[in-house]
Amino acid sequence: MRATVHSGYVPGCIGRIAQMHAEYYAKHASFGLHFEAKVAQELAQFCQSFSPERDGLWLAVTPEVQGSIAIDGAHAATEGAHLRWFITSDSLRGQGIGRQLLQSALAFCDERQYRRVFLWTFAGLDAARHLYEAAGFRLEHESPGDQWGRTVLEQRFVRGEI
């Protein structure tokens, strides 16, 4: 399957991104309703308050949405830009589209001179961690937490400084 990277919202992307997250993390981390609802609610809020000067959304499309990544720049000056909703479908995983999405998001941050970019994830997602570290992120914090509906070893990765 061949995908292209599209910048910005497309109809149905909120539901599709929430679906990809819900299905992947139910299978690989036993996350459930709490996680799916959190993704859908926070992504919908992000899209409703989206400002192209500070925020970015990139989608891998085939033409169906098969991957996503977002930069929430609402607090970029104080906390850093927040990298969120990074995922690719099983059909595209391992083909380099995740790297393309991440490069698009970080190029956006560099263009806007965001001095710090952070993301939350959890231990065990080794392929994603490899991409983050190759892009200049470093592990800043690690501790047990349950922001996704069950206790995991949460990790905060950071690129740059404030």
Image (cartoon, grey):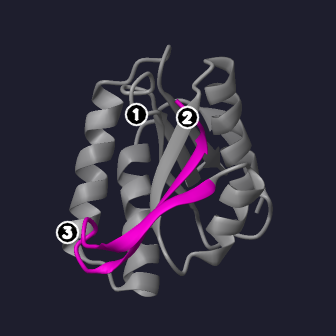
Mark nearest the camera among 2 and 3 is 2
**Disc 2/disc 3 C-alpha distance (Å):** 29 Å
Residue 103: x %, y % from top left: 73, 42
97 sits to left or right of 52: right
**Disc 1/disc 2 C-alpha distance (Å):** 8 Å
Q: In the drawing, what numbered circle is on residue 79?
A: 1
Amino acid carrying mark 1 in the image? Glu
Residue at 50 percent across and 13 percent down: it is 53
Residue at 55 percent across and 46 percent down: it is 69
Amino acid carrying mark 2 in the image? Arg
- Residue 132: within the magenta? no
Between discs 1 and 3, the one toward the N terminus: 3
Could you say which is closer to the camera, residue 101 or residue 91?
Answer: 101
Q: In which quarter of the image is residue 128?
A: bottom right
- Residue 143: within the magenta? yes
Q: In the drawing, what numbered circle is on residue 132?
A: none
Residue tagged 2? 116
Q: Are marks 1 and 3 in contact (CB under 8 Å)?
A: no
**78 versus 92 height, above or below:** above
